[in-house]
Amino acid sequence: MSSAYALELRDLRKSFGKTEIIRGANLAVTAGERVAIIGPNGAGKSTLFNLISGRFEPTSGDVLLGGQRINGMKPYEINRLGLSRSFQITNIFPKLSVFENLRCGVLWSLGYKYTFLKFLADLDDANERAEQLMEMIKLDKKRDVLGMNLTYAEQRALEIGITIAGGAGVILLDEPTAGMSRSETARFIGLIKEVTVGKTLLTVEHDMGVVFGLADKIAVVVYGEVIAFDTPDAVRANAKVQEAYLGSSVADAQAGGGH
């Protein structure tokens, strides 16, 4: 089933016991758009990501990926349909090299699954793709360095490489620049833009400088609802959004602050 939207949420709801966290969220993201999801702490942003990626099952409503309903699917099943996610906490193989981490990420998409009839060193297509990814994320000079010996920013770059390794068309990044310095953050925005060209990107981000520097559109989540979904300029000017969340952060971002 095809759809005009890469990802769509329809009256999505999630309750934990008697507490409703997501309260009828609606969102329609066009293929190729970069969308930042923002909102105050406790607004439901992480829960929304968990619902989209299959870690949580909705109480009601629908999540559609390319027009296909993915409610109740396992995260790995959703991944195989073309959605990949990174996490707030860096999630790499610490005792594998940069190259080996990336090669692990490409194996399934190339059809190798769990049965290896030949040595990994002989998998020319997997090795070539891993080399390409290594150059894209600017870690080609760290090819044989173990994941645990990379700097924090390099580990985050490696995780993004693993996230895009399978060729997913929809990428979810959960606070990708958290814990980075201003200079690292600036470089990372450029890296994210470069590696997600032609892909649909959703990112949860608190840094307004990152949000306004990266996103084509911004979805504002407050009390489990999407109260605004528009271009950065329109969101900046939205009085309802400013009252609910942004306030001085918008002014800081406009003045070049936000880090």
Image: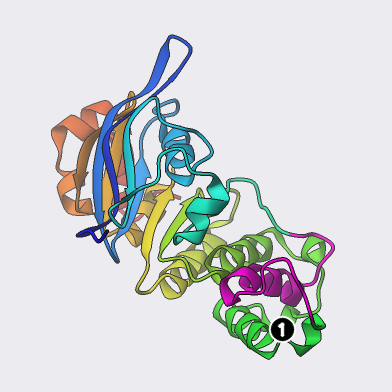
Kindly indicate the quadrant of the structure image that contains residue 108: bottom right
> Colour scheme of this structure image?
rainbow
Q: Confirm whether residue 176 shows in the render.
A: no
Which of these two is toward me, 78 or 214? 78
- In the figure, is residue 13 to the left or right of 184? left
Which region shows up in magenta? 93-117
For this orientation, the residue located farthest to the top is: 18
Tell me residue 11's x, y (percent): 25, 31
Q: Residue at x 60, y 83 (%)?
A: 129
- Relative height, residue 224 to residue 70 (above, below): above
Q: Is residue 78 part of the magenta span, yes or no?
A: no
Tell me residue 24's x, y (percent): 27, 27
Q: Residue at x 50, y 34 (%)?
A: 56
- Relative height, residue 119 to residue 4 (above, below): below
Mark 1 secondary-structure assignment: helix
Which residue in the protein does label 1 denote? Answer: 141
Q: Residue at x 58, y 56 (%)?
A: 181
Q: Confirm whether residue 68 shows in the render.
A: yes
**Identity of the amino acid at label 1?**
Lys
Tell me residue 247's x, y (percent): 27, 33
The quadrant of the image that shows the N terminus is: bottom left
Which of these two is toward me, 79 or 93? 79
Which of these two is toward me, 122 or 170? 122
- In the figure, is residue 12 to the left or right of 123? left
- In the figure, is residue 174 to the left or right of 155? left
Kindly indicate the quadrant of the structure image that contains residue 33: bottom left
